[in-house]
Image (cartoon, rainbow, N blue to C red):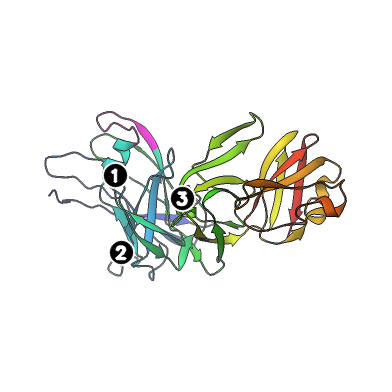
Amino acid sequence: MDTPVEMHRCVINMKTTKKRTLIASVLIVVIAFAGNASADPAGGQINSDVVAGQIVTLYLDVNPSDYVTTVVRDGSTMDPPLDYYYFSSLAPLLDRNGFSLSTTDPFNATIEMRCSGTERDIDGNTGSAYTNTLRNTTPTTAHIQGVYDGALDWVIPLMELESCASEETFSKTLYAGWNLISLPLTPSDSSVSAVLSGVSCDAVYRYNATSKQFESADVLDPGTGYFVHVASECTWTYSGTAYNSTGISLKQGLNMVGWLNCLKDVDDALSSISGDYYYAARWNTSAEMFEVYNPAAPSAFNDFTAMDRGAGYFISAKHDCTLSENC
């Protein structure tokens, strides 16, 4: 097995306007393999010395669902003593996403520390579920742009962190067949494999209100409704921060939307588009039928009277308008 023979680290000094000097450590890792030039590796330091053992994720921006994880390492012997991480080889990840290592193909990647997820090796094999106590402060803390030249240099900003304590967990029963869902929490990892981890599903679709076509979905975002086809009844559980405010642009005709992290009467929930829509509908998986709310109909004729967290809805808009609401 090839072994790394070289690692370089540099420290960049930045001056503030008050003439104090701040130290921002940037780990530049260049690992050459004996007899084999390879795309190796990506690495960096974290602005903390208490995160060793937690998990960091890297993915190419062209395909966020294909990712690789690594364990944060103890940086107590570093100067300054900050914990760090590195990915020893990215070649298989690049290969299966269409990047040839024999040419100077440019690519961008993102490194994140997420609150939770599933470990995954460079060959795409999934491992154990994990939970971190800290996460990076923005969804894309570290963007990488590399050009293969036989020895890639990766210069990655110091990763800043915040507590995962503000996250909460949502659970919902999904039934065999089609389920119309939405996300009441904003996940740190929006890929289908992460949000629906543990759910045996073989199809996820969203509705494009412009083309009026269903499209396969690779990521799941709050504010959007999704049809998920589930093989057998299960409990869907994921974590994230509360999605409490929305401003969804609706197109004339059908729109498949998501709802917030709260329960509201339909009239109150859709008050911002009062008079601008014909009806709202939700899908009853057990009965395999739509249930409808018509604001012009007597209450006895409506199948539901509230919009709930975790459910997705169709709204038939009379014209282009914006659905705005807060919890």
Secondary structure predominantly adopted by residues drawn in magenta:
loop
Residue behind mark 3: 231
Which image quadrant is residue 34 in? Answer: top left
Q: Quadrant of the C terminus?
A: bottom right
Say which label, 3 or 2, has the lower sequence index.
Answer: 2
Which label belongs to residue 73? 2
Disc 2 residue type (three-letter) = Arg
Residue 72 appears at what percent x and percent y? 33, 62
Q: Magenta residues?
A: 97-107
At x 85%, y 54%, the residue is: 299
Q: Position of residue 254 (x, y in %)?
A: 71, 36
Name the N-terminal-most of marks 3 and 1: 1
Callout in the foreground (3, 2): 3
Residue 164 - label: none
User: Nearer the observer, disc 1 or disc 2?
Assistant: 1
CA distance for labels 1 and 2: 18 Å
Q: Amino acid at mark 3?
A: Ala
* Mark whose residue sits in front, 3 or 1: 3
Q: Earlier in the sequence, mark 1 or mark 2?
A: 2
Q: Which residue is mark 1?
A: 90
